[in-house]
Image: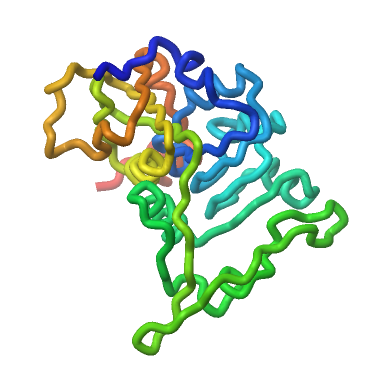
Amino acid sequence: MDKVVATALEAVADVPDGATLAVGGFGLSGVPNVLIQALYERGVAGLGVVSNNCGALESGLAVLLAAGRIARVTGSYIGANKEFARQYLAGELEVEMIPQGTLAERLRAGGAGIPAFYTPAGVGTQVADGGLPWRYDGSGGVALASPPKEVREFDGTEYVLEHGIRTDFALVRAAKGDRHGNLVLNKSARNFNPLAAMAGRVTIAEVEELVEPGGLDPDAVHVPGIFVQRVIALTPEQANAKMIENRTVSASAATGTVSG
């Protein structure tokens, strides 16, 4: 089955207001920027986003966030995103913060058809006991707090029950992909893209290099095509548009000296 779609706008044409999205990427690595930009151009709003972080350096999900298009974020890292913090504290954004490993497993479990699982992460904290501020009232008070979760003991150790995550759509980015939707990811882009791809009921992948069926080594495939419904091929310019969050150089490079 040829899953290639001509444009990003066509690929996201049926994403409605209020949809839930699992979005791949880790920091600036492996972020489906082209698909996110297409959603921005369509004007889709009220989105519920599940992603490790919500964009950085005014890229990725930060584009939708700054435009007020995101209503709820489920993630594990705010980082240096000042607009994220502002909206959260002002009561404009609902935020569910989750331990990073738990977020990864909730996405994987949802994609694997596992409704819930027990984990020790968060036991004895507000993650399990409830009370984490999901939404502020804009005046420093908490308008909506997280509910308590079931805690159960196994072999003398307490575990908290966490639910798998399924979303209406998923947006992911891959280094290579074929027309059947099989994807190959590069290095840290593998952190959340495979999990997001599994969690989406309709998964859309932007690929830096599109190859014909049979062009990928089956042993190198990180996301099987069964999890992917649409593929768009990036232009060379889009594929090469990669940002660096913090550029650093050694002292010797900065001064022009050579050490040896």
Taking the image as drawn, is residue 249 in sight? no
Q: Residue furthest right?
A: 139
Pinpoint residue 195: horizontal percent, then vertical percent.
37, 45
- In this rendered view, identify the residue nearer to me: 70 or 109: 109
- Say which quadrant the N terminus sits in: top left
Residue 109: x percent and y percent?
38, 54
Looking at the image, residue 226 lies above or below residue 102: above
Residue at the spot x=41%, y=54% of the render?
A: 104
How many discs appear? 0
Residue 30 visible to the viewer = yes
User: Percent position (x, y) of residue 115?
Assistant: 42, 57
Going 53% across and 18% down the picture, which residue do you hit?
13
Q: In the figure, 63 relative to 101: above or below?
A: above
Q: Is residue 236 left or right of residue 68?
A: left
Q: Is residue 116 left or right of residue 3?
A: right
Q: Is residue 203 left or right of residue 227?
A: right
Q: Is residue 195 above or below residue 162?
A: above
Q: Residue at x 51, y 77 (%)?
A: 151
Q: How is the image coloured?
A: rainbow
Which of the pair 80/258 is nearer the observer?
80
Q: For the view shown, which residue lies furthest in the top direction?
A: 6
What is the x, y in percent for residue 130? 64, 70
Q: Quadrant of residue 133?
A: bottom right
